[in-house]
Amino acid sequence: MLPVLATLFLLHSCFTQGDGHVLEGLTLLKTEFALRLYQSVAAGGNGTNFVISPAGVALPLEILQFGAQGNTGRQLTDALGYSVHDQRVRDYLHSAYATLPTSSQGTEMELACTLFVQAGMQLSPCFVERVYWWANSSLEPAPMSANLSELGEPNGTTDQASEGGPRQTAGGRLQGPSEGPGGSLWEQVSAAFPQLVLVSAMSFQSTWQKRFSSTDTQLLPFTCAQGLVLQVPMMYQTAEVNHGQFQDAAGHQVRVLELPYLGSAASLFLVLPRDKDTPLSHIELHLTASIIHLWTTSLRRARMDVFLPRFRIKNQFNLKSILNSWGVTDLFDPLKANLKGISGQDGFYVSEAIHKAKIEVLEEGTKASAATALLLLKRSRIPIFKADRPFIFFLREPNTGFVFSIGRVSNPLD
């Protein structure tokens, strides 16, 4: 993986060549950010399924950059690899986010971020304006719920606002419902300093450009990492797809397949070790933005038999621990955090950072279907891509090249 200084230099060199290179530089940096997240989660995932949204993680960090100063701001820039204080970065990202949420051409994708703050806190009017201007973001008073996992569900991040929720006064003071925030959530964290909870969420559901037929789905073997063989619902189709065979920096052979969604709104890329004896963990260690860029731009059209297991993944992550491991520590420290751009006050810090992501990969419009008794036979002279062992997937938007989701399937039945 490229060091932070190298990626920052790469972005700077792209910018100095003109605005037309902003997309290329940001795409590489955001891909590197996505892979860094993936590897952080994979390192502690014990080989389990997971999905995380790099775009959903980057969004609140970008918002915090508007209010972060000093060392806190530098740590956020190091984590992201770029700064929204650069006018060209800010303009480009705002333009890219303006297309979200979307629910057209069979695609539903939502990216949202909510900043929960204690009602009555004095906020900078400039910061408040930037939050509402930046993507699908909002400020809310701290709810009475004691369960952080209930916050920030996709399609529900602003429900409180429609129920007599926050009111922004002329002086920038956030007011909550008449009863005000309370409950054990805010009793569990220190009340000595003003606090902020960030919750981001990303959801995606779309229709394949070429749909899988539920009648072709059948139970086929899937070999898990530990050698356990399971019978899983495996989707099937014969289609013209983008496919390639490559090797990583360590020489491991991989196969990459692109499955586009309707209207080319996004594509799902699958990375599968070619050798069944190569653990996926060996591939994960050597992923870099440059390798991903090479793979995705070198795919070739081919007619193939495609076997892909249905899977559904939904999980939640504590970003605080991940960011701490990256060196973003001041943000969560009530004595060191410098977020004066948010409130103009000392002692304002982030107490929690929660991220949720989910993805469903299945036949269009089919939540569940019985496997047929018909066994599909290998077709002569047509190559096969069969995801019958652990694989990596990432959801990529073609216009920006941003990775909206990245994850791993180790067991489709989990």
Image (tube, rainbow, N blue to C red):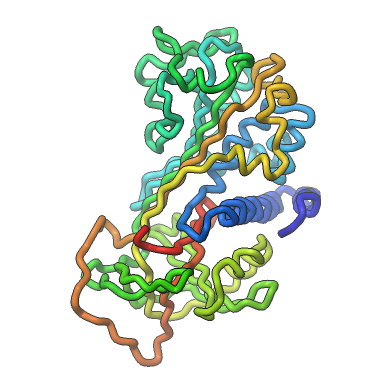
* Side of 355 where 127 appears, left or right: right
**Is residue 113 in view?**
yes
**Is residue 128 in view?**
no
Q: Position of residue 331 (x, y in %)?
A: 68, 30
Q: Quadrant of the C terminus?
A: bottom left
In the image, what residue occupies the spot 73% across and 24% down?
338
- Identify whether 364 is placed above or below 294: above
- Identify whether 239 is placed above or below 21: below
View extreme (bottom): residue: 380
Q: Position of residue 62 (x, y in %)?
A: 63, 36
Q: How many marks?
A: 0
Where is residue 330, by image quadrant?
A: top right
- Identify whether 378 is placed above or below 157: below
The one of 273 and 192 positioned closer to us in this rendering: 192
The one of 107 and 363 positioned closer to us in this rendering: 363
In the image, what residue occupies the spot 37% across and 26% down?
159
Q: Position of residue 208 (x, y in %)?
A: 36, 62
* Side of 358 where 120 appears, left or right: right
Where is residue 10, by image quadrant?
A: bottom right
